[in-house]
Image (tube, helix red, strand yellow):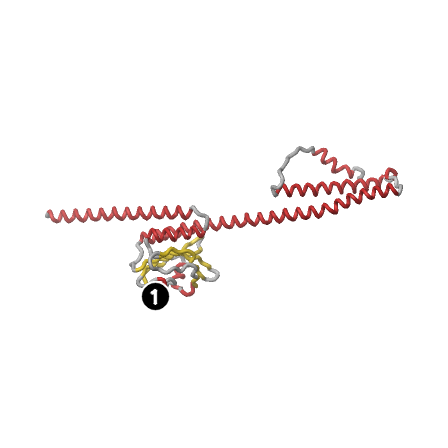
Amino acid sequence: MSLAIYLNILDEVLRQFKYSQDELQRTYGFGNRLQSIADKVRDSLDEAQILQTAVQELAIGLEVDSCDTGIYDLQHGTSTVAYEYVAGQVLPVQGLVVSMLDYPEVYSQLLQGQYVHGCWYPLDQKFHNVRRISGHFAALVHPIIDNQQVIGDLWLYRVGAEGFEPEEVWLVQQVATQCAIAIRQARLYQAAQAQVTELARLNRLKDDFLTTISQELRTPSATIATAAQMLELELQRLGVELAANPGLQCYLTVLQQESQQEIILIDNLLALTRIESETEPLVLTTIDPHIWVADVLEPFADYD
């Protein structure tokens, strides 16, 4: 074998080795880019910020002319372009509402969890964003899937390009997965916050109700207590000896004590309402259950 042949073989080996190194470096770069995007996306609990970050990072990282995301309304069969990042001469379309029935070839695949990738011309009406772009363009559309349901998609455009490389498709797939996870967390957080807000509202209504009803009950209870006192005075004026009428004395005593007890209970309820609403400091004290129970039972001691 001649020296020239050996040199050619060696040159081919070195070329293949350099190609492998370049591919390894490229793969490593895509991995780092994915990690960076995932960290930024997963750090937020704001759905708007999650999607805007994903769109911007993909557009800049993959050097595309436009990247946007659609949010699906499956009940009405529409997709709304919620967030976008536009570079170059591509016209913006944020806020555009698209009927899925108008583009069945695209959305039939997306709703099945499959991405769409290819090159088209503006005369091809397969994409709803074609009016943004003049000339030959490449598009990559990937669904955002959460719990087996497609909740949105990512659209990437390159003007005059031949298409997206496998590593780029892989990166978009991974970012779509990270977006789905982050959106699920954001929506769960928002749902929890809504429940907290609703519970706080109901608690305020409860406090207002207890305050109102307690004040309303306090007035007739105080009136009953006053009437019991006036009844005792009127009996004395009429010369009725309560000591000679133990039954009457007992009934009058029960009426007076229970009306006072009712006023105390209402006052305690008002105090508890203020404590729960944190408008009054909580002061703890020690009670003797034997004395407390005895006071409750005392009015009924004469009854079998």
Q: Residue furthest bottom?
A: 123
Residue occupying the point 74% across, 36% down = 295
**Is residue 142 visible from the viewing direction of this image?**
no
Number of labels in the image equals 1
254 left or right, relative to 208: right
Given the current orientation, which residue lies at the most extreme left position? 2
- Amino acid type at mark 1: Asp
Left or right: where 274 falls relative to 107: right
Q: Residue at x 27, y 48 (%)?
A: 23
> Which quarter of the image is occupied by the C terminus?
top right
Task: Report the residue marked by disc 1.
Answer: 124
Q: Quadrant of residue 82?
A: bottom left
The one of 289 and 1 positioned closer to us in this rendering: 289
Q: Secondary structure at mark 1?
A: loop
Residue 260 in the image, given as x and y percentages of width and height: 75, 41
Q: Residue 53's x, y, as percent?
A: 40, 51
Give the residue at x 35% y 53%: 59
Whether residue 57 appears in this view of the structure is yes
Depicted 282 relative to depicted 97: above or below: above
Residue placed most toward the observer, 240 or 299? 240
Identify the image quadrant of residue 237. top right
Residue 279 occupies which quadrant of the picture?
top right
Q: Position of residue 130 (x, y in %)?
A: 36, 63
Q: Residues within 10 Å of mark 1 (few under 14, many from 20)?
A: few
Residue 234: x, y in percent? 85, 43
Task: Report the residue that reaches farthest toward the right.
Answer: 239
Rendered view: 244 above or below 63: above
